[in-house]
Amino acid sequence: MTERCFRSAEQTGFDEIKQNLAVIRETSAEAMDKAGRKDELRIMAVTKTVPVEKINYAESLGIDLLGENRVQEFLGKADGYSPDSEVHFIGSLQSNKVKYIIGRVSMIHSVDSIKLAQEINKRSAEHGITTDILLEINIGGEDSKSGISPDMLKDTAKRIEEFENIRLRGLMTIPPPGGEEKYFAKMQELYQRMRQDNANIDVLSMGMSADYADAVKYGSTLIRIGSGLFGYRNYNK
Ligand SMILES: *Cc1c(COP(=O)(O)O)cnc(C)c1O
């Protein structure tokens, strides 16, 4: 676990965002080296509750991938983002909201049911596009979390691969707090098995502000960083 104390978002100005990003880049590069990895790691800036000016500032520092949790918030902010940034949807997604984001995000990380995949497929077909998706795995088997159980992965992937306007690209997870390493190791195993069956699989989305170095150790190709970059969120405000 990376032990760092994050400051609140209000206290986190541009200079601090710059320093935070330098730490994240350095720490993740070290973790890549330690793991003997020469492949690529993407750093996503998670934008929930963050004002557009700060997101634009992160973009000016070379962040080219944004992660969105909430459909309404995204729709309100997206016009202010740099057109060069890629946007992925990472939050829990209700089927009836899918129509608002198709064509506006290039990947959806949080697909946790065939029904949701079906809706993404249908709306993508209407737009004449293919949408990349990841399957969210409930790796800790927690009742409180969404995601597919590892036992169901193979069958679910098989069915989703049949949809014409979806391209399955890999897996995403949010592990239970504490003991992450064991869960990251399990995710790596599932991911590698999946890659043997499907040549499109190239994204393992895992690791957040508190645990990204461990995630990198177990093969994460995309880390999702919010508070470690922009400061601690205060939802009561
Ligand atoms: C908020 C969020 C993150 C980032 O979490 P931090 O701990 O603030 O880095 C990553 N992934 C998802 C799905 C999130 O909702």
Image (cartoon, rainbow, N blue to C red):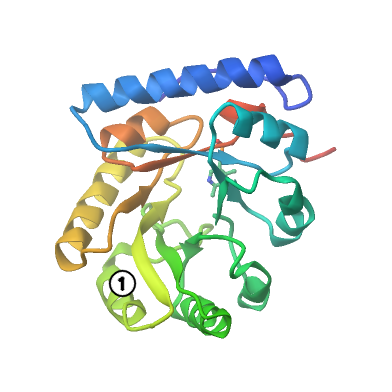
State which quarter of the image contains the N terminus.
top left
Residue 6 visible to the viewer: no
State which quarter of the image contains the C terminus.
top right
Residue marked by disc 1: 152
Query: In the image, is 97 to the left or to the right of 130?
Result: right
Q: Nearer the viewer, residue 37 or 136?
A: 37
Q: Residue at x 46, y 39 (%)?
A: 177
Q: Residue at x 40, y 44 (%)?
A: 206
Q: Percent position (x, y) of residue 122? A: 53, 85
Q: Is mark 1 within 8 Å of ligand 1?
A: no
Crowding near the residue tagged with mark 1, few <14, some 14–19, many ≥20 C-alpha atoms within 10 Å: few
Q: Residue at x 48, y 80 (%)?
A: 121
Query: In the image, is 28 to the left or to the right of 188?
Result: right
Q: Nearer the viewer, residue 188 or 63?
A: 63
Tell me where residue 53 sits by quadrant: top right
Q: Percent position (x, y) of residue 107? A: 49, 60
